[in-house]
Image (spheres, grey):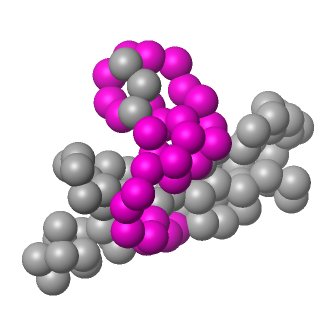
């Protein structure tokens, strides 16, 4: 089943909330964002729609990320760093009872 969310990304049906189109909701909260390669970045947002439970949106690069195998460890570390920052900010929001 597809759900309307504030992005134009279309994801396949399956577990979780899959977004397409527009939904009237509060402005997304950026939990973290950062580069994972010189050309690609990763962004994680918290969505709090008025008519659904909160959800975390992970915006991966639209195109495939290509890297030299010798640099893959750095790419993986960069992705994990952005994800860890998002986890930390989400925990802070939960601690402040905003979620």
Q: Determine whether 65 is above or below 52 in the image.
A: above
- Give the residue furthest to the front: 24
Q: Residue at x 30, y 67 (%)?
A: 90
Q: Determine whether 1 is above or below 9 in the image.
A: above
Q: Is residue 55 left or right of residue 81?
A: left
x, y percent for residue 34: 66, 66
User: Where does the magenta region start and end?
Assistant: 4-32
Q: Which residue is drawn at 54% across and 36% down?
A: 20
Q: Is residue 71 left or right of residue 44?
A: right
x, y percent for residue 91: 24, 69
Q: Which of 27 and 30 is in front in this view?
A: 27
Q: Which of 7 and 92 is in front in this view?
A: 7
Query: In this view of the protein, can residue 5 be seen by the observer?
Result: yes
Q: Determine whether 3 is above or below 61 in the image.
A: above
x, y percent for residue 35: 72, 62
Give the prevailing secondary structure in the magenta stretch. Answer: loop
Query: In this view of the protein, can residue 85 be seen by the observer?
Result: no
Q: How many labels does the image show?
A: 0
Location of residue 94 (image quadrant): bottom left
x, y percent for residue 92: 25, 77
Q: Which residue is drawn at 23% across and 50% down?
A: 51
Q: Does residue 86 show up magenta in the picture?
A: no
Quarter occupied by the C terminus: bottom left
Q: Residue at x 38, y 68 (%)?
A: 26
Q: Is residue 68 left or right of residue 11?
A: right
Q: Determine whether 12 is above or below 6 in the image.
A: above
Quarter occupied by the N terminus: top left
Location of residue 21 (image quadrant): top right
């Amino acid at each position: 089943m597809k759900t309307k969310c504030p992005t134009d990304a279309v994801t396949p049906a399956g577990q979780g909330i899959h977004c397409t189109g527009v939904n009237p909701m509060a402005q997304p909260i950026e939990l973290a964002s950062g580069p994972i390669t010189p050309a690609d970045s990763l962004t994680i947002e918290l969505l709090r729609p008025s008519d659904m439970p909160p959800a975390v949106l992970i915006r991966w690069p639209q195109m495939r990320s290509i890297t030299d195998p010798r640099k893959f460890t750095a790419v993986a570390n960069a992705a994990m760093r952005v994800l860890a920052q998002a986890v930390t900010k989400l925990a802070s929001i939960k601690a402040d009872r905003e979620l």
